[in-house]
Amino acid sequence: MSHPGPVSVIQISYDVALLDSRSHSDSARRQRTYARLLADRRPGSSIVTVVLSDKRVSYIVRGNTEPTVIQVRRRRGVGRIVTSIVLLRTLRKRGACAGSVVTTQSVQDEAWVALLYCRLAKIPIIGQVHGDLFSVSASADSSKSIIVASLRSALTRRSLRWFTAIRAVGNATAEDLRCWNPNVQTIPVTMPVLRTDYGTCPPATAPSVLFVGRLVAAKNMNCWLEAAKTISVAVPGCSFEIVGDGPLRPMLESEASRLGIGDSVAFRGLIAYDDLHCYYTRASVFMLTSSFEGFGRVVVEAQGFGLPVVASHIAGVEDIVLNGESGFLVSPLESDRFAERVITLLRDPKLAREMGSVGMRHVLERFDPDSLAEAYIDLLTRVADSADGSCRRSGRAWPSRKTRLGLHDD
């Protein structure tokens, strides 16, 4: 009986942090873990990550002790045709047939280019979905045109069945996707939620409410600030910290002043990942008012630090927060309800500690980084091994013109 051979993985990503060889970001650590686990399990295996980005980056990792990373410039408008051609050429150059598998960070746009290549080359492909793919908020964020958003949504539904497998980060999303593709597996995003090498932080001196994330429309930060105003009246001395940046920051700073809470709300801007722990450890409650989340990793981080969470009842987040046990889930845009739940926790420190402890235990069990990384490697090797072998027999990364036309040599 022959033993499974090495696996050649080509990942298509949008994470520009992977292009910097000096990066200590969580995503860079995650990719190094994947490469190490795959090499341990299947000696001779490799992972090549193709990063699509419109930014010019000076530092690109190329193999040796690190995963290989290649940048493909992502152009806008008609320039996307050029991006697609370059991506196809990159896949053809890197897509050795034996044991190959391609993964895409999404199931749209450039993922369709990869899907076309894989179907012609008979290479298995895994699409990844990081949120409620067909929610109104997701569609609104992806395009300013309702017509274009509707066309993308229709094309996405039709293309889902052509992926060999799909990885979803939440259970509710996975159930929806199975309407179009039965081979869906739920694997949340891995993250080092409970590292032990963090430095010490100044202790909290007053109750505080925390938000971490990008300041964009989907976060519903106007609702967050309205809730903060109500909370500040009910709990005098409470402070509010907003960690993150984005295009809406100037407007939100003006809104905080208009609501009369400008002195209580601190906009901290972008904070290095390794410094975030101080903000989590000194907060009393974490509040998230989003109408859409790709996954809700900040909720996992907050619970990992023992914080009770009050968050929107949306896909992804509902897999993380145990409603009534580790925090509370609230319908998006109900600022009064958000405020009511946060006030309850601030006025009852014992309840807040109990919910925080439940959340921490849940995170340890459900989102253990080692287990999730192993599950992702299991998916890669299973899909690679499921290939029908036609590509291996041809020995080509791209079928010949005769093969594509259905012709054969005599």
Image (cartoon, rainbow, N blue to C red):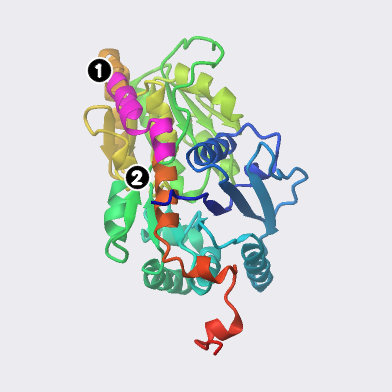
**Which residue is rendered at x = 45% and y = 50% of the image?**
4
Residue 45: x and y in percent read 56, 46
**Which residue is rendered at x = 44% and y = 38% of the image?**
373
**Which residue is rendered at x = 54% and y = 82% of the image?**
403
Image quadrant assignment for residue 149: bottom left
Residue 131: x and y in percent read 39, 51
Q: Specify few, some or many for label 1: CA neighbours under 10 Å numbering under 14, 14-19, or 20 or more.
A: some
Q: Earlier in the sequence, mark 1 or mark 2?
A: 2
Residue 162 located left or right of residue 242: left
- 152 w.r.t. 7: above or below: below
**Label placed on residue 359:** none
Distance from Cα at disc 1 to Cα at disc 2: 24 Å
Residue 133, magenta (yes or no): no
Image quadrant assignment for residue 84: bottom right
| SS category of the residue bearing label 1 | helix
Q: Please, what is the three-letter code of the amino acid marked with disc 1?
A: Leu
- 123 w.r.t. 215: above or below: below
Residue 262: x and y in percent read 53, 29
Q: Which residues are magenta?
A: 357-374
Quadrant, the C terminus:
bottom right
**Which residue is rendered at x = 45% and y = 66% of the image?**
389
Image quadrant assignment for residue 132: bottom left
**Label placed on residue 316:** 2
Q: Main secondary structure of the magenta part?
A: helix
Q: Which residue is mark 1?
A: 351
Q: Nearer the viewer, residue 320 or 188?
A: 188
Q: Is residue 126 visible?
A: yes
